């Protein structure tokens, strides 16, 4: 919980041992880069821009966010669901 006016102790990182897989690291980094939260790091250019699914995933994730009446707190879950749906569509 974030308590306004208190400088320390508001936030802490909680992650179970073994939960941070390489796949999850790459997904989190992609989301972080996409939304400009990585600082000055530029996102790597895809080999073929038309093959880059990031814009489609971002649109789908935002649609899921809007369906929840713009309630925050599930951005990663929305991103992963959107990515999964697009992968399933690509297989068809």
Image (cartoon, helix red, strand yellow):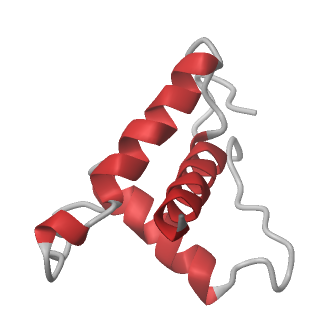
Residue 54 drawn at (x, y percent)? 33, 58
Say left or right for 28 vs 57: right
Q: Is residue 82 above or below residue 68?
A: below
Say left or right for 15 vs 73: right
Q: Residue at left 48%, top 77%?
A: 26
Query: Based on the displayed image, in which of its 4 quarters is residue 71 positioned?
Result: top right
Query: Based on the displayed image, in which of its 4 quarters is residue 62 positioned?
Result: top left
User: Which residue is nearer to you in this view: 23 or 53?
Assistant: 53
Query: Based on the displayed image, in which of its 4 quarters is residue 19 positioned?
Result: bottom right
Q: Is residue 92 above or below residue 82?
A: below
Residue 64 drawn at (x, y percent)? 57, 30
Q: Residue at left 59%, top 88%?
A: 22
User: Which residue is nearer to you in this view: 74 or 53?
Assistant: 53
Say left or right for 49 vs 36: left
Quarter of the rendering occupied by the N terminus = top right
Q: Residue at left 68%, top 84%?
A: 21
Quarter of the rendering occupied by the C terminus = bottom right
Considering every residue shown, the one lying at the far right of the view is 16
Considering every residue shown, the one lying at the far top of the view is 69
Q: Residue at left 38%, top 45%?
A: 58
Residue 33 drawn at (x, y percent)? 31, 61
Residue 53 drawn at (x, y percent)? 33, 61
């Amino acid at each position: 919980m974030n308590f306004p006016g208190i400088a320390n102790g508001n936030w802490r990182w909680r992650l179970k041992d073994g939960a941070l897989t390489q796949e999850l690291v790459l997904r989190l980094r992609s989301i972080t880069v996409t939304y400009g939260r990585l600082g000055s790091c530029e996102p790597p250019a895809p080999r073929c821009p038309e093959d880059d699914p990031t814009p489609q995933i971002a649109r789908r994730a935002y649609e899921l966010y809007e369906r929840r009446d713009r309630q925050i707190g599930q951005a990663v879950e929305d991103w992963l669901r959107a990515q999964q749906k697009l992968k399933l569509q690509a297989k068809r």
